[in-house]
Each structure stands twice: as structure tokens, then as C-alpha cells.
Image (cartoon, coloured by chain):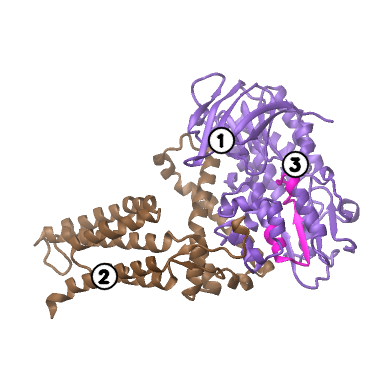
Chain colours: A brown, B purple
Amino acid sequence: MPIMAGRHTSVCIHPFARAAALVCGISGTLIGNCWPVLVLGYAAIVVPGVVFSKVGRNHRRFCAGVALPFFVSATIVWGIVVGDQPGGMRHRDVAAGVQFAFLMTVRLVLLGGITQWLLAAMPTDELLSTLTRWHVRGELLVIVLSTVAFGPEIVRLAEQVSMARHSRGLVRRRTLLIESTQVPTLLRPIIALLLRSAIRRGEVWRQRGLIDRLPCLGNVELNVAHITSVIYVCLAAMWLVVNMTIRFAGRT
Amino acid sequence: MIINFGKPLLIIDGPNFSGRTATLRNITDSASTPMSHVRARLTSSSVYIGPEIYNSLSGIGLTVRLEIQLHAGRPLGESPIRGLIERLELARIYDRSPFTLSGGEQAMVVIASCLALDPDVLAIDCALEQVDDGPRSVLVNWIANGRRGKYAAIADNSLSEWSLEVPNVRIDLEANTSRVDHRCGPLQFVDCSPIAPRLTGELRLDRLQFAYCAGAPIIRNASARLCAGAVYVLAGKNGVGKTTLSKIVSGLLRPQVGQVLLRGNSVPPWDQPGRLIGYHFQNPDVQLFTTRVEDEICIGLSALGYTTSEVKVRRDWALEAFGLSSVRAEHPLDLPFVARKRIALASILAAGLPWIVLDEPTLGQDQQSREAIRTIISALSRYGTGFVVVSHSQSFRKSLQATSLLLQNGTLTVADRLGPE
């Protein structure tokens, strides 16, 4: 079978190109202060990238679960309570306050989208080799991988505990509303199970000497897609240049 | 006691709480409190795999490939373990997360990973109980014959069912050692009339279909008519979907197509799970919520609406039958795996429901305990409680004299009645 061949290879973006694209993309977003340009960049570059990387569903969740509540609260703060953008007089320019809230939200959506596209969508093998080529090694690599693995594990654990409470008749129906009221009762068993797992896995790591075996993990030959890598870097660089030009052009 | 690895495989036999786990942990130098009567001279590496398979995973293995590669310390194509991986057919699950695998598959991945480490001594404590007969033989043969100059120690409650064709040394701890942890009493049969169900009825599975990911159904077309008071054994290979189907039957997972009917009512049981169909989880830890053993048994009973006196009667039955009276005030998570499994089982059986689904109820239980569990199931079935049991123990399945439900490629077949040979 192919997976039993000597080394596993996959077509991927060069790790340094990925890093450059990530840095330029995030910098461009943070520098950009013209919301129509940011929205245009989001629609033209980030949305296709997210969809192409098959993390569209996760991005939708991010928008609905994080960006939307942020927008609502930011609008309340800057549009209603303050009534102006930061540094302005109170209740002098409500429209500017709302516009500021919108700009912050667009930046947040862009940052989330870029991170999901360039980091979260990476296949496991590519993630490892990319991290090791970024000099994320040893215990730091364990921390990063544990962080990636922790989210899905805690979701599964919460699902199991919730299911077990349901099976014991402690929860009548598993609707979103009822389950959200169960969070305090779920916390104790989940924390207990996580602590137990941490202790057991600590023993496992010590006994098996796994920390010494980490260097092998990134030892995967990558089949780099050079043209795609160049396109990623060019797009990100353009993004940075455009936003810098718009922001700093008027100052000179 | 001097344990001499005269042959590659050391079999440690004995009942629960006889010190098997403590011995294995001492052999592998992983015990928190070394036993005075077991002295192991370890030249170098040793690995212990306990019954809590979930916690034996590294935790950073995002895929099965990564988990094994981390242990092997080199790309798998260059690892001598690849022959074993091919024989266990692990390649088909290479790109899946180890946490999403079934219990048996997780056990195979953990043992294969530890074999990739190539330790001098490998101790396996009840971790093979969830593995199918075929892969288990492959693993045991590999452990005993595939590692020259290396040793392994195995404790397992299904040893009597194995056809061991490898040279081994066998020790019986009951005969040779004092009991090191005897906090739980023996599991025993107690008259089941106090926990008899109030309601009984036929359960019908009607063209069930279920998929975790769209386009890849794990249950395709499962239909069956299960009679009240009957015992059914759900059989099938590791990873075929036994646990998934049993959760659907219990109303814990909602099928995409089809329905489960109790007493012919159109009200599907997933509106009231836990009130009509009890479910005993493979991993007992997820269904332990309280800080005292007796509270753990009572909490579900109170939720079911039993009066205080009824709760007391059922609690006393559970504590006595499952040998938990001596630990009634202890925290369930402070007890060993075998005791936690008993607490979870006792909590479900004491509820007196018309149907009970048991996922690997004999995990970690010795022969005497298995016999007691079988007797309780038989007694309750005479009162009208129906059982669906998932178990890898051949002898337990046969002793139940149950009707076999074979799950294969997502479809369910009602096979012949199982019975003693």
C-alpha cells in the first residue's frame, strides 16, 4: 500500500512561504484601516482560500460564534455608550463609532480566516514538518501538538459525559438550550477526567521516553508545490503593500 | 516471590485484587509503591499497558500513523514493526485520530506502538480483552516470537479462552502472593426481585441508518425485533460499529433514517433515554459523577422518580451484589478500574429498566465475577428485562445462552442462539 512505502509525502506549501504569507497577511490586516479594502480582500482572497482548504464550515462557525457577538458588543460600546471612535468626544459622531466597531470586526474575521486557511487547514504530516522547519522542536513541539489535539479531545469528552448524564436520566432532552444549562455540572467530571488523563499520560511519556523520540516526527520529505507557494507569498505581499500604501500614503 | 522470565512470555493468572496489576507495574518499574515481594532487575527499558487504553495513548498523536511513528522513532517504512501493522490491518485507519477509534482498535494501536518501542519487557494488563480473536493471536505471537531476547508479561481475564501456541511460564498469584488490595468484596448473586422492572416490552429496530460523516454510513440497514426478557449478544469485528449501534438502540444517538420502537409505541425512546433503556458505557469513567460510591448508585434512581425507600432498597442491592459495601463512602475515581466498572454496572442494573444495553460489562472482571454478572442478567431477564450485550469474551457470550446479533458491513443479522458447547 502507498502508506507503507518508505516515506510519506504530500504536495504542500513550502514552510517558509507559509510563514511569510502568514506574517504578511496578518500584518496587512492589522495595518489596514480602510474597511472597504479589507472587505474586498476578504471576499476576493480569504473566502476562496478558506473554501478551497475545506475549512469553510469552521470559518462559518468562527464568524457566527466569535465575530458576530464581537460586532454586537463593539457596536454597543462604540456606537451607543461612547458614541464616537476612540479618542473622540462622547456622543459626537455615532456613525464613526459604529464604523470603528465594523472595522475591528472585519479585522477579526480576516485574522481568523487567514489563520484557519494557513494554519488550521494544514494536513498532519505537513503541520509537523512545517513546525520543525520553523524550529518548533522538543518540548515546544509537544506543547503545540497537544494544543492542537486538546480541542477535539475535550469536545469528545464533553460529548461522552453529556451522553452519560442523558443515559442516567439526569437530563431529559438534549437540546442546545438544556445542554447549555448543564455546563456547570459537566465541568467537574470533565476536569477530573482530564487531570486523570494528564497524570496517566505523564507516566506514559516518562516510561516510554517519548520526549527523546520527538525529532523523528518532523522527518518527513515534503513534495513542495513551488508555484502555489510563490502565489501565496505574492498575494500576501500585495495585501501588505496595498494596506500600507492606503494607510501611510497621506502622511508623506 | 522470584519471578523468573525463563521463557519469552510470562502469563500472570489470578482473580481480581490478587495483585496482578501491582506485579506487572513492579516488573516494569512503574509502580508508585514498590512491592516488597516482587523484585525485578531491569537492564533497560520496560513498558506497562493498563486496562485504561484511552490514557495509554500519547495524547499528541493526531493520527494513528503519527502515534506509531512517535514510538518507533523513525519513519514507519523503515520500522521493523510494519509487518505487524500489515497483519493487524491498521493501515486502513492510519489517517484517523486515535481518539475516534473503537476500544479494540485503540488497544491494537497502543500495543503496536509499544512494540515499535521495542522494550526489553512489555507488560500488558487486561488490554487485550477488547481485541478480536484474530488480531489478538497475531499480537500474542508477535510479542512472544517476534522479539528475540525480549520478554513480555500478560495478565488477562480471558486467558482460558486463548489457544496459546507460544512457550510461556504461568504463575498463579492467588496461590503465591498475599492480596495487596482487597477493598472491594466479591461480586455475587443476590435475589433480583427488589430491582425487577415495572415495565417490559418488545424493542424493534426499524431500518436504522447512521453515519458520523456524510457519505460514509457505519450502520446501513439494521432491523431486528427484540423480544422482552430476552438476552441478545451484539457481535462483530473491531470497529464495525457495535458501540454506535448500541448507543442508537439506547436512544443516545439519533439515527439519520429509521427508528427504535418500544412496546410498539411510535414514541421513539430517544425522547426519554435513561428512563426506558439503560446504557452501560465501555469506559466507566465517563458515567461517574458523584464523590461517593453510594451516591453514584442513588443519583440515577432519584432522577427516575423512585421514592426514598425504593432508592434505599435498590442501593443496598447494588452494594451487596457488586461487593461495594466496603467502599460505599469512597470516591469512585479513587478506586481501581475493575471497581469503577462494577460501580457503573451496578448503577445501571439497579435502575430496573425494561431494556439494558451493556457495552463490554466484563472488562477487567475475573471468572467468578463474570459468572455472577451472568447470573444476575439471567435472573433479571426472567423478570422481563431485555438485554443487549456487547462482549469480546467468548465464554461469557456462550454462557449467556443468548441470541446473537451479527453486525457486518453495517447490516444486522439475527444469528443462531449461542449456548455452551
**What residue is rendered at 55% in x and 33% in y?**
B220
The image quadrant where one finds the N terminus of chain A is bottom right
B24 or B176, nearer to the observer: B24
- Amino acid identity at mark 3: Gly
Question: Could you say where residue B277 lies in the image, as x and y percent from the top left?
Answer: 58, 30
A65 or A168, nearer to the observer: A65
Q: Which residues are magenta?
A: B112-135
Residue A83 to residue B401: above or below: below
Q: Are marks 3 and 1 in contact (CB under 8 Å)?
A: no
Question: Could you say where residue B9 lies in the image, as x and y percent from the top left?
Answer: 84, 58
**What residue is rendered at 17% in x and 76% in y?**
A248
**Farthest residue, direction front:** A227
Gap in angstroms between the C-alphas marked 2 and 3? 72 Å
Residue position for label 1: B219
Question: Could you say where residue B327 lies in the image, as x and y percent from the top left?
Answer: 70, 47
Residue position for label 2: A238
Gap in angstroms between the C-alphas marked 3 and 1? 38 Å
Question: Could you say where residue A132 lies in the image, as x and y percent from the top left?
Answer: 51, 72
- Amino acid identity at mark 1: Ile
Please state which of the two labelled residues, at mark 3 or mark 1, is closer to the viewer. 1
Chain for mark 2? A
**Farthest residue, direction bottom:** A252
